[in-house]
Amino acid sequence: MVRLVALYRQPADPAAFDAHYRDVHTPLVRAYPDLTDLKVTKLGGLGGQDLVFYQMAEMSFASRADLDAALTSAPMRDSSRDLRNFADAGVEVFVADDDAVVDG
């Protein structure tokens, strides 16, 4: 399995961010081809510390090929364009490949 992970920075208006993410952005993400799971998590700092990130979204795919196909899809383009409508503080996006786990 492989995941596309998005870490959203603290928004200026959390309520507006949440409403847009729930009502507009999530339906766009759910339209990704071959998406097997979407997990959205609110984040918090340890011991009361402020955290630079507000929310994490993990989009799971069965294979890297499925993710690569989704990355070039119309729903991905639509969701990428939508980021400017609510992620004003910024977002970090990366791939987490569960098959590339290092034994330690």
Image (tube, rainbow, N blue to C red):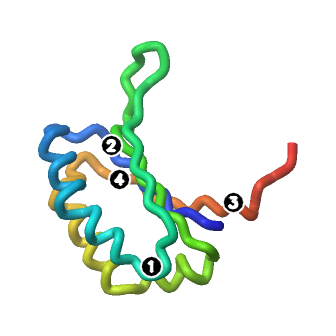
Local crowd size for mark 4, using a 10 Å CA cut-off: few (<14), some (14–19), many (≥20): some
Q: Earlier in the sequence, mark 1 or mark 4?
A: 1
Q: Amino acid at mark 3?
A: Asp
Quarter containing the C terminus: top right
Q: Which residue is mark 4?
A: 91
Q: Is residue 88 left or right of residue 6?
A: left
| Relative to 71, residue 5 above or below | above
Task: Give the alpha-carbon distance from disc 1 to disc 4, as whole Å.
Answer: 16 Å
Q: Earlier in the sequence, mark 1 or mark 3?
A: 1
Instruction: Pinpoint residue 32: horizontal percent, then vertical percent.
Output: 39, 77
Q: Secondary structure at mark 2?
A: strand
Q: Earlier in the sequence, mark 4 or mark 3?
A: 4
Q: How many marks?
A: 4
Q: Amino acid at mark 1?
A: Leu
Do tag 2 and tag 4 residues touch (Cβ < 8 Å)? Answer: yes
Task: Give the alpha-carbon distance from disc 4 to disc 3, as whole Å.
Answer: 22 Å
Q: Amino acid at mark 2?
A: Arg
Q: Nearer the viewer, residue 59 or 72?
A: 59
Instruction: Pinpoint residue 34: horizontal percent, then vertical percent.
Output: 49, 79
Task: Give the alpha-carbon distance from disc 1 to disc 3, as whole Å.
Answer: 18 Å
**Residue drawn at 28 percent across, 62 percent down:** 26
Q: Secondary structure at mark 1?
A: helix
